[in-house]
Image: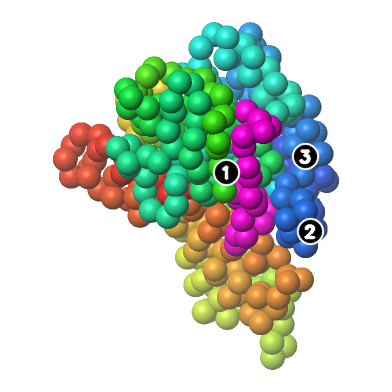
Amino acid sequence: MDFDYSEEQRQLKEEARRFLSARCPLSLVRATLEEGAQRRTSRTLFKEIAELGWCGAVIPEAGGGLGLGYVELCAIAEELGRALAPVPFASSIYLFAEAIMAGGSAEQRSKLLRLLARGEIVGCLATAEGSGAYQHRSIGCRVLAGRLNGAKIPVIDGDVADVALVLAAEARGAGLYLADLTDPGVERTALESLDPSRGVARVNFSDVPVELVGGAGEGGALVERIFDRAAVSIAFEQLGGADRCLELARDYALERHTFGRPIGSYQAVKHRLVDMYVKNELARSTAYYAAWALASEAIELPRAAAMARVAASDAFGFASRECVQIHGGIGVTWEASPHLFFRRARQLSLVCGAPDGWAARLGADLCQGTPARSIGAEIA
């Protein structure tokens, strides 16, 4: 069985790389850090990405999208990760759009999917209420008579999103509710984070009108399904970032000379580069398998997603650290690029839950022989 990209998918990936190389150099990523809270993301770049059809890759044609497939989305995700694109693509497409397609009513899909595909609105998913994994039975946000009260923290891209899907409790259990973040009852506070190129916010809701997405009391199950599916695309973003780290480290090892020879000729440096390559290839294998499971709606998807999530988080985290080390003293300076990848590696490792949680879930699945229930998420 061939898990590699098809010729058409490879062409899409190459076109995405050419576009992002021209429109999203690392200088743009660094600029988002320098501008701080004044500009957490590039809406201009996000709009250009939407005009290329990327936001609508998996949105059906009837909903205004391209109706391509999840492998195509994974190919795009890999290039976004390689470029460290400072756009709310993951929040809006992997999470919010996926939730609307999975649980939204016909009216909700008709109203939102076309806007998402065109990049006219940005969506986000709000589940966390502080550090640690959320528990369905102890959710602080409450819905009463169609009105939402409470707070979510941290919410990735919550500072720039227009709409949010909020996990909240009501009489029938946890539900997923659609909230307009431009409502007067919404108060957003941008938070400092390790990677300011992807904004994080605290979002307070005070008597905000909301509408249910999916069935009553089914919010927890819907969130877990979304996380399984989003984890695959996020793994490809991590893979793209890890590959770029290896390339930067290799290039610097050939360029930097000590005692009249490139540092890449020293065995210690070679071993570091080889270790990076091996972890990246292991992550690639699990990511391809997860992409197949996602595209074919295979029963193995929860396990495949956990495998990809764990391997990709490990590969990107390791590659970003080694890239800094191989660059030596300049690797920790503001002007050098390695710290940008280290920041993004840490940020992506917490989206949809930390790697330790996914590893525990995978271990339980493998030991018991049955899919383990999700242990929750730390950031969504």
Neighbour class for label 3 at 10 Å: few (<14), some, many (≥20)? some
* Image coords of residue 248 (percent x, y): 67, 63
Nearest the eye: 189 or 288: 189
Looking at the rendering, which quadrant does residue 53 occupy? top right
Q: Which residue is mark 1?
A: 203
Nearest the eye: 134 or 211: 211
Measure the C-alpha gap from mark 2 to mark 3. Answer: 14 Å
The stretch in magenta equals 180-201
Most distant residue in the bottom direction:
259
Q: Earlier in the sequence, mark 2 or mark 1?
A: 2
* Residue at (69, 41) in percent of width and height: 160
Neighbour class for label 2 at 10 Å: few (<14), some, many (≥20)? few
Q: Element at badge 1?
A: strand
Tell me the amino acid under the disc marked 1.
Val
* Residue at (56, 42) in percent of width and height: 204
Measure the C-alpha gap from mark 2 to mark 1. Answer: 22 Å
User: The N terminus appears in which quarter of the rendering?
Assistant: top left
Whether residue 306 sits left or right of residue 61 in the image: it is: left
Q: Element at badge 2?
A: helix
Measure the C-alpha gap from mark 1 to mark 3. Answer: 20 Å
Residue 296 in sight from this viewpoint:
no
* Image coords of residue 380 (percent x, y): 49, 42
Neighbour class for label 1 at 10 Å: few (<14), some, many (≥20)? many
Q: Give the label, 2 or 1, closer to the camera.
A: 1
Whether residue 219 sits left or right of residue 85 in the image: it is: left
Q: Element at badge 3?
A: helix
The numbered mark at residue 35 is 2
